[in-house]
């Protein structure tokens, strides 16, 4: 049976309804996919709760990344054919057994690449890539701070940073999560439930501060993040799991040392097809070579999306969470 988990309005995790759908037919330039694995991300939670708008309004099928098998192609599509294994990240539509999608948004999976890994790495892996290569271009010898180090993006970024010779300090919410982050490239970790991360960063860096802070937490970490930066350092805000930053002032950047600040989003970095392909190839190569290991630590049935969202929001997850149709 083909079905989707549909949100008819914003609200809590109980708003999702399992609804039967007809398998759609691809139009010109589109590809029909049968999903085999679907990623779960905080952006899905933001859209469900109303913090961010759903891409096409409500009712909405949320979900921003997935992997699957091509079942049909529309006219004008030359790069894909039935049977191809593919993956994507885009604005919504993934919480379903089947969907059609613009062929320009798809990438083929390398031979032997697991669907579950692909579904878990597209949004988070490509996010980690642009954060450390574009938002702040790290170099060997840098020291940086990464909040939510045991989360999906954090565990990927920690490994990538280590491979580049960067000293990565990570914050996490428990002793166990800190240990997990250290196993994934972080040199030092800070349990923010028991330690003041600003003071700990000062101790670790001997007062020098860090070159960049990568912050997906937002409201609760923002003031301290600026205090952790060295003069001319860069504050990279790429999420707001604790709520939006509401008191940002340009004068804050001057007060803390002529800082830089940026609020990037992945889809601006993969808007062009050539950029999507280039970054995906780099990511897949890093995973296939073992430079980066993707940890799928939670798996739910697609129909159990409520439980998946509850686990994510309550910070009970580590690494990647996926849904299986």
Image (spheres, helix red, strand yellow):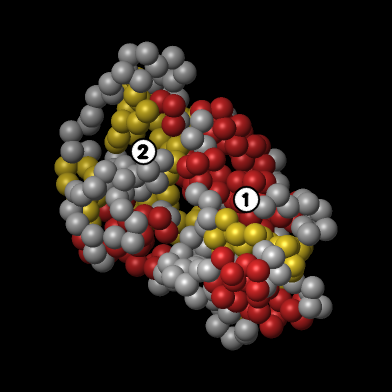
Rendered residue at 60%/46% (across/down)? 130
State the residue in front, 76 or 130: 130
Kindly report the distance in space between the C-alpha atoms of the residues bearing marks 2 and 1.
32 Å
Q: Position of residue 99 (x, y in %)?
A: 30, 34
The local secondary structure at tag 1 comes to helix
The answer to whether 206 appears left or right of 170 in the picture is right
State the residue in front, 271 or 246: 246
Farthest-out residue, bottom: 194
Residue 184 in sight in this render: no
Splitting the image into 4 quarters, where does residue 49 fall? Answer: bottom left
Quarter of the image containing the N terminus? top left
Quarter of the image containing the C terminus? top left
User: Where is mark 2, residue-wise?
Assistant: 35
Rendered residue at 55%/49% (across/down)? 127
Residue 325 sits above or below residue 236 on the image: above
Q: Position of residue 39 (x, y in %)?
A: 42, 49
Rendered residue at 59%/71% (across/down)? 252
Residue 245 in sight in this render: yes
Residue 31 sits above or below residue 3 on the image: above
The answer to whether 267 appears left or right of 300 in the picture is right
The answer to whether 199 appears left or right of 153 in the picture is right
Q: Position of residue 63 (x, y in %)?
A: 35, 48
User: Where is mark 1, residue-wise?
Assistant: 135
The local secondary structure at tag 2 comes to strand
Mark sitting earlier along the chain (2/1): 2
Q: Classify 10 Å Cα crowding around label 1: few (below 14), some (14-19), many (20 and above).
A: many
Splitting the image into 4 quarters, where does residue 55 fall? Answer: top left
Rendered residue at 47%/72% (across/down)? 247
Splitting the image into 4 quarters, where does residue 88 fall? Answer: top left
The nearer-to-camera label among 2 and 1 is 1
């Amino acid at each position: 049976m083909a079905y989707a988990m549909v949100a008819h309005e914003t609200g809590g995790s109980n708003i999702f309804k399992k609804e039967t759908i007809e398998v759609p037919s691809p139009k010109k330039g589109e590809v029909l996919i049968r999903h085999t694995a679907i990623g779960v991300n905080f952006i899905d939670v933001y859209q469900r709760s109303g913090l961010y708008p759903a891409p096409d309004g409500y009712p909405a099928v949320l979900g921003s990344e997935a992997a699957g098998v091509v079942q049909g192609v529309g006219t004008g599509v030359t790069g894909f054919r039935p049977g191809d294994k593919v993956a994507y990240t885009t604005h919504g539509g993934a919480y379903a057994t089947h969907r059609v999608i613009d062929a320009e948004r798809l990438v083929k999976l390398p031979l032997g690449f697991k669907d579950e890994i692909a579904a878990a790495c597209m949004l988070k892996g490509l996010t980690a890539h642009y954060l450390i290569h574009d938002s702040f271009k790290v170099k060997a010898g840098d020291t940086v701070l990464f909040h939510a180090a045991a989360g999906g993006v954090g565990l990927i970024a920690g490994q990538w940073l280590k491979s580049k010779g960067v000293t990565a300090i990570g914050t996490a919410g428990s002793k166990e999560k800190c240990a997990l982050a250290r196993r994934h490239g972080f040199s030092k970790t800070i349990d923010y439930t028991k330690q003041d991360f600003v003071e700990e960063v000062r101790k670790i860096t001997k007062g020098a501060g860090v070159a960049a802070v990568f912050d997906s937490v937002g409201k609760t970490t923002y003031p301290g993040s600026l205090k952790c930066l060295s003069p001319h350092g860069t504050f990279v805000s790429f999420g707001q799991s604790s709520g939006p930053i509401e008191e940002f002032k340009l004068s804050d950047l001057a007060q803390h040392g002529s800082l830089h600040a940026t609020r990037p989003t992945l889809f601006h970095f993969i808007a062009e097809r050539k950029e999507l392909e280039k970054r995906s190839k780099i990511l897949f190569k890093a995973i296939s070579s073992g430079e980066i290991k993707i940890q799928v630590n939670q798996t739910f049935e697609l129909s159990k999306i409520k439980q998946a969202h509850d686990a994510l929001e309550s910070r009970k997850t580590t690494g990647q969470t996926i849904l299986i149709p």
